[in-house]
Amino acid sequence: MLPTGAKETQLRESNSQKVHPQPIEEAMNQNPEAMETLISKVFMNISSLKSAYIELQAAHTPYDPDKIHTADKLVISELKNLSELKHFYRENNPKPVCVSPQDSRLAAEIQEQQSLLKTYEVMVKKFQSEIQNKDSEIHQLQQQIEEASQKRAKLEKNLKLRGLSTKESEDENGFFPVDLTPDLFTSAVEVAAKAIHDFSKPLINMMKAAGWDLDAAANSIEPDVVYAKRAHKKYAFESYICQRMFSGFEQENFSVKLDNTTATKESFFHQFLALREMDPLDMLGQNPDSIFGKFCRSKYLVVVHPKMEASFFGNLDQRNYVMGGGHPRTPFYQAFLKLTKSIWLLHRLAYSFEPNVKVFQVKGGSEFSDVYMESVVKNLIMDDNDEKPKIGLMVMPGFWIGGSLIQSKVYLSGMKAAE
């Protein structure tokens, strides 16, 4: 039996202690060195985990999938090590014991670290989810890149077939080179034909506004043509433009007076490339007296008759300005420059080939040949007699390029239009 005072003292000491789920005191009493080693490993492991977590965060800015995967594996590895230490401790210390206040502080610190571990585990799961989302986005972007590459390959193939394929870099002259092929010339012919058609529209509209008799004007261009429809008389004006724009095409200088200079195939092609992507007015602004500038002036004076211009504008100011070496910035002259550019490029291209592209024109009244000619109106009906259709107008000349033929475009006279 203990004295009453001794019992009370023992009870007070017992009440001042707490019951802790981990047997720290007993473990430390039994093997203090092992316990210190274990605790040291725990703290070292937590430090490593913090470092791995920082690396994982850093890998997201900028986003680096490889670094993220590496840091993620390192975090998971440290978490596994902590889990193993926890299981090792529980297996070797199964019984709860009373611990001192000093041990309680140690236990509280361990508990705090365990709470941090749970936070890290949550963050790791979040990062893993973000990684999966980023991987999905990367996969989608790769698919889009692949689809875009396929579309680009198709476009390049189509451009190559038309003779318009380009290379990745400019050549030594600063141009994006194109393949000099018959297809390129065929494409240029189509552009020139469209340019003639486009310029005829404002020309006809200005004639109407000036009070011209369009029937009489069409008949003055080619009097013997019998039109299937009145609307077909527009081809007379296209023929008028064509004949004047292509006059001198068979000459190397295109009827432009030049100094005694010898042009090479390469120089013709370089002239084609230089103007091909430029606005003609910008080109003339840089060098108004260039060979192209002289060509524009000479053709304007031929296509736009003085009486025509006077009726359009009430004066000859624009004509006088052109004759004086200028290039007016009026809408009408700019529309004319688009036409002039297309014909000039076609001529430069024709003389880039070896041998030169040959032009051939068809006269009104000639017999139609479906080998050399193409009708601009497709729904014409031939008469029952055996006579071949006659050419009324040539709307676009034809060309010989090597052994290939580009048909001239003509309007047939005396035909009937299908309803």
Image (tube, rainbow, N blue to C red):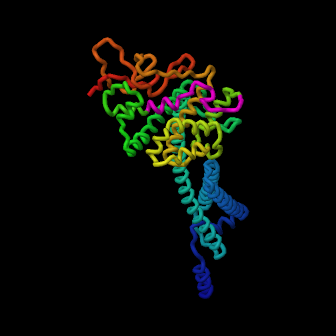
Give the image quarter of residue 403: top right
> What residue is rendered at 51% in x and 40% in y?
336
Front-most of residues 44 and 191: 191
**Residue 168 visible to the viewer:** no
Q: Position of residue 261 (x, y in %)?
A: 71, 30
**Residue 290 visible to the viewer:** yes
**Which quadrant does the N terminus fall into?**
bottom right
> What residue is rendered at 57% in x and 72% in y?
19
The residue at the far right in this view is 33
Q: Is residue 3 above or below residue 361?
A: below
Front-most of residues 178 and 107: 178
Front-most of residues 202 and 68: 202
> What residue is rendered at 59% in x and 79% in y?
14
Q: Which stretch is magenta? A: 238-261
| Chief secondary structure of the magenta portion | loop
Give the image quarter of residue 221: top left
> What residue is rendered at 64% in x and 30% in y?
268
Using residue 268 as the reference point, say whether residue 399 is left or right of it: left
Q: Is residue 240 magenta?
A: yes
Give the image quarter of residue 288: top right
Q: Position of residue 314 (x, y in %)?
A: 46, 49
Q: Is residue 216 magenta?
A: no
The residue at the far top in this view is 386
Q: Position of residue 78 (x, y in %)?
A: 64, 55
Q: Is residue 45 above or below residue 414?
A: below
Q: Position of residue 331 (x, y in %)?
A: 49, 47
